[in-house]
Image (tube, rainbow, N blue to C red):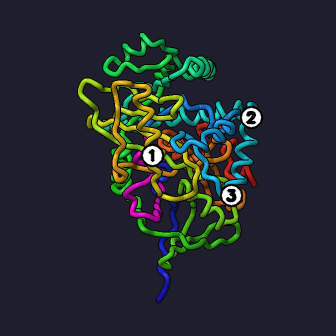
Amino acid sequence: MATKTRLPNVVIIGSGIIGLYSAYYLKQKGHKVTIIERTDGADGCSYGNAGMIVPSHFIPLAVPGMIEKGIRWMFNSESPFYVKPRLNWDLISWGLKFYKAANPKQVEQAMPALRDISLLAKKLYQDFAKEETNDFSFEERGLMMLCKTEHNFDEEAEVAETANKLGIEARVLDVATLHQVEPEVKPDVAGAVYYPGDAHLYPNALVKKLKDLLLKQGVEFLYNTEVADFEVENSRIKSIRTQSGERVAVEELIIATGSWSPILAKQLNINLPLQAGKGYSITLEQRDGKKLNIPSILLEARVAITPMADNLIRFGGTMEIGGINQDINMNRVRGIIKAVPEFFPDYPIEVPRQEKVWSGLRPCSPDGLPYIGRTRKYKNLIIASGHAMMGLSLAPGTGKLVQEIVDDEKTSIDISLYKPERYD
């Protein structure tokens, strides 16, 4: 039986939010686009996240002191950050790189890079909401960092000072002002830092909208399609062979498979240090008389709370570095649930049944910066991955950069720190 071959085009592996926005901007430039997805596309890391657009998150995960915190948290089954101990060379290598990146000099370099892509993405979200209609509940209400202790409030006020120097507006709020902002729940905290430039949306509606839009524009989705191997010729990827034996011809290839990206990179002899960081969320209905107005992060607990469309509210958190698996650790979920009444005494939440808990894997690079760019090894391969908890927040910015790279245009921002092969 002859092997079926498709016409050459831009192929994106991965139908998560990064892959979808890459396809969106490529279609705007007239490219033929095919998206290959190993699942049925019904779920992914983009669906159940907190839906926050956060230029305020300009500090990478790898910061001085995080290793010490991580070691302490490892002994608490309900802690917000956990590395599952295991004899795995990829994990050990990633941990050493994380340790090396967690120094003041690298953090100073990373902050403007994260700021620039965040502000680019925020502007593109604003444009997208105007051009394609805002039926995914994009709102610009800002974000509050709620601090339980005076010590952490003082530290977060210093972060606010750094933010303002970087051009990201931040306001320090005392408790009285905070209670005016959230009169129905009155947080029991030492204070808060408010970032008015942040935004949020309803991820489920956004993903559906993008898929529907791309289908109407002629993007081809190949669901339940596993990549078996690649045909390479003269430093170019010529085609992809799927597990079913079909060959998909390639002009440009984009790997945007999140936590699964290192697996494909390894097939192409590219070293892409990534660890999957599992997060959990639960979505409930807002309570009459106890509604939250502004998305918040409970600083000490690392719990995100987002009021969403349809009178919903989403609670999410934890970073569980435990390899690629879909297991749900209910102790981690209990950690999220227990934190809420500590900050909102009149807002107790019951631990949900396991089937009501959503989990997703965030692709975490060692230095906290995404991988975005063309590889040296293959002339037509672009990698767009490693966004950790910021995938949805940075998606349109990443998609636009991917399009600019494909078209050999000057990129909207400097992407030199995002090089995919920076660890080779």
- Is residue 167 in sight in this rendering? no
The amino acid on which the numbered mark 3 sits, given as a three-letter code, is: Asp
Say if 253 sits above or below 346 in the image. Answer: below
Q: Which residues are magenta?
A: 23-50
Which one is in front, 346 or 108?
Answer: 346
- Residue drawn at x 30%, y 26% as measured from the top left: 291
Q: Earlier along the polypeptide chain: callout 3 or callout 1?
A: 3
Relative horizontal placement of residue 284, taking residue 235 as reference (left or right): left
User: Label for residue 313?
Assistant: none
Mark in front: 2 vs 1: 1
Q: CA distance from mark 3 to mark 1?
A: 24 Å
> Which element type, helix, strand or loop, lies under badge 1?
strand
Q: Which residue is mark 3?
A: 90
The reply to whether the magenta stretch includes residue 47 is yes
Q: Which residue is mark 1?
A: 280
The reply to whether the magenta stretch includes residue 381 is no
User: Label for residue 103?
Assistant: 2
- Residue drawn at x 56%, y 23% as measured from the top left: 168
- Residue drawn at x 60%, y 43% as measured from the top left: 75
- Percent x, y for residue 70? 64, 40
- Is residue 375 in sight in this rendering? yes
Residue density around tag 1, few if under 14, some if 14–19, many if 20 or more, within 10 Å: many
